[in-house]
Image: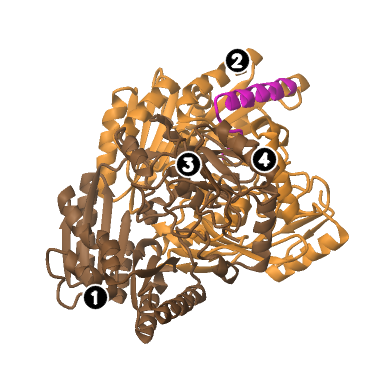
Chain colours: A orange, B brown
Amino acid sequence: MPDAVALPETADEVAKILALAQEYRFPVIPRGAGTATTGASLASKGGLILSLLRLNHILEINEEDLVAVVEPGVFTGDFKREVEARGLFYPPDPASYEFSTIGGNVACGAGGPKGLKYGTTKDYVLGLEVVLPGGDRLFVGRRTMKGVVGYDLVHLLTGSEGTLAVITKLILKLIPKPPFEGTVAAWFSGPKEVAEAFLKVLQEGLFPATAELLDETTLSAVKNFLPEKIPEKAKALLLLEFDGAKKQVEEDISIAEKKLKEICLKVEIAYRKEDREKLWLARRSISPALKQIANGKIADDVVLPRSKVPFFLEFAKQKGKEKGLFVACFGHLGDGNIHVNIIFDKKDLSQLEKAQKLREEILSEVLRLSGTISGEHGIGLTKKGYLPKELSPAGLSIMKKIKKIFDPYGILNPGKVF
Amino acid sequence: MPDAVALPETADEVAKILALAQEYRFPVIPRGAGTATTGASLASKGGLILSLLRLNHILEINEEDLVAVVEPGVFTGDFKREVEARGLFYPPDPASYEFSTIGGNVACGAGGPKGLKYGTTKDYVLGLEVVLPGGDRLFVGRRTMKGVVGYDLVHLLTGSEGTLAVITKLILKLIPKPPFEGTVAAWFSGPKEVAEAFLKVLQEGLFPATAELLDETTLSAVKNFLPEKIPEKAKALLLLEFDGAKKQVEEDISIAEKKLKEICLKVEIAYRKEDREKLWLARRSISPALKQIANGKIADDVVLPRSKVPFFLEFAKQKGKEKGLFVACFGHLGDGNIHVNIIFDKKDLSQLEKAQKLREEILSEVLRLSGTISGEHGIGLTKKGYLPKELSPAGLSIMKKIKKIFDPYGILNPGKVF
């Protein structure tokens, strides 16, 4: 529990709070909707929760400049809809987008399924207005599409998890909205076959917006949520989405279908929204399905070089089996970002211990395979211990010195990341 | 002239040089092919030129991971061709790409015409191996498509113009190669009409890879280089390129043609390479054409919010007229990045003075219109004086402190940027 909560309505109020915090040396934890899975927005050392939920205005959507100006407390889903109503597109789509905020997405460098084709949140931030510890205000970046004036402080702040400054205004890049979408669901005998087929699709010059993979364990968890039986022998599901002009999407999908069929067991295609939703049902049911299995979950969002994904999935499955734990892997095959969920019974201490041991083995393997321990969730509290395993002492030392430049007294989100 | 030039062949040799430089406190100026227009790679304070041209190996192009690993001295054009031979694509295309290096492109955050759809160099850097002043080696970033572990040092180093570290290896992101391209050339009565027509194209959901604009003054300079007469009343040229699947490109271009014809004087379309080259001739002739007019040139690469481009072009033209100077504006309308060239007689001191005054007026107007003074060239020596006009004292102070973290004794590219 925090010692107090502040709900400022303006950047000026945020500045006054940060001036007080520096004067009296109390911790300030910036917070959007609090959906971070890593504890990044928790008051783990007490102090003041600084909610940005009242700075919640979309200030401008400029159709000619392809730019939007928003406050941090705007919900990402609301923003996406406003943008799309004008024929434009803000691609970042973290799973939480209906109940997470733009400010939180930027603070944590949020990802999402569309990362392969469209990149992630950090690719859409042009400029930021922030308040520094002590209350000074700072604008970094620009309103233009390009710019190379001075060091890139925009990307430095994006993904810094509220440890460097408090975002009070964002200038975001928009693109034209692709007019048409289509979905392909392909069932495979295993993840190796999925990777092989997906490579064939890429080699045709096709560039799907989304490529989601569900492994065998995940499919066994969601099977009761699906209206139809999973095809016999199916041990992996690949969901592809294509977007663009109608003719192009249809052509892309017909090429993809041909390539997938060379390897997969069954393929389904949908263009109408309700039919596409049906194909996505397996993916959307993962979260409730995993909750039915047990009450404990350790969730990581590792990223691997794409070629290493099949080997890694096999590794996670085997290691889970050895320890008698349920390990469900699914996620964004397109960019190699795999969600690893270790499921266990919280009340059974021996299971918790095994799960923690398994997690360590899995994250070590990720690093051995030239992967990274977090693709879109960040570090927060839950991955702090693993940071020195991925980053070199020299890199960590530079980051800590940068933290000191912005926050010399360590009042901003203390105990997070490092 | 530098005091000496070093041509190391390995990162180890680079490390030894930077250790010596720190011990004996001599300036080191990292240099690729030396194409920077800003003086970023000149030994303006003497010292050692550290050429990276012998670290020139493409170490890996991984078709499955969509990743390449290269040394900094590889020429960008060579790299692009190697990648394309494998059906993949490295989009960044600074005008210099045949004679500039990947290391230099990354150090300066180079742009290019394809920025609208594909972003710039900085969007394709996943990881960097660098040597710090003093000789310590550091790896930042990753080999994976995504990653949010710690602060983003990759983007901090990208565009830092060799003032923070020396790049010795780069991990770059690739994408599938679009299989087909088409070019549209549309002649207009003025830049306002171009902007209006281009907006209509975007509003159709079309997303051209390139949108290049040539203003009246530029057209008058290149007209003798073109085989055919410029259409009567034509005072601006828009070049659009579309890429993707063949059917989609053809459909996009037919929609674009319809929309452009509502406003433009004449439109030409080409799909075959040699025909497309013909349409690009006007754009490619700018540099030799401007050299014919006079021997002096001040070239800036400002960026404006796209909606402000027509007003700005009119402003530059008027101000040039008032001073009796030839001001040619052309560039990337897609992302608002306009190359402003003030042409004058070097031997005439009064013209030089007028040109410098005009430059100041133009850059001030850019900032007043919420633009930035450099979209792709960087600051180097020639724009240092304007940095404090764009950046706030607080922002500059943070950047200088970051410089001190990396380079406490100021040996790396001293006198550049700040």
Residue at image coords 73%, 40%: A381
Asked if the residue at tag 3 contacts the one at tag 1, i.e. Cβ–Cβ closer than 8 Å, the answer is: no
Residue pushed farthest right? A24
Q: Amino acid at mark 2?
A: Lys
State which quadrant residue B238 falls in: bottom left
Q: Which residue is mark 3?
A: A113
Q: Amino acid at mark 1?
A: Lys
Secondary structure of the residue carrying tag 4 is: loop
Nearer the observer, B3 or B163: B3
Q: Amino acid at mark 3?
A: Pro
Label 2 neighbour load within 10 Å: few <14, some 14-19, many 20+: few
Q: Which residues are magenta?
A: A353-375
Q: Do dots 3 and 2 share one subunit?
A: yes
Q: Do dots 4 and 1 share one subunit?
A: yes
Residue B298 spot, x, y in % from top left = 41, 69
Residue A59 spot, x, y in % from top left = 55, 69
Q: Earlier in the sequence, mark 3 or mark 2?
A: 3
Label 3 neighbour load within 10 Å: few <14, some 14-19, many 20+: many
Q: Which residue is mark 2?
A: A321
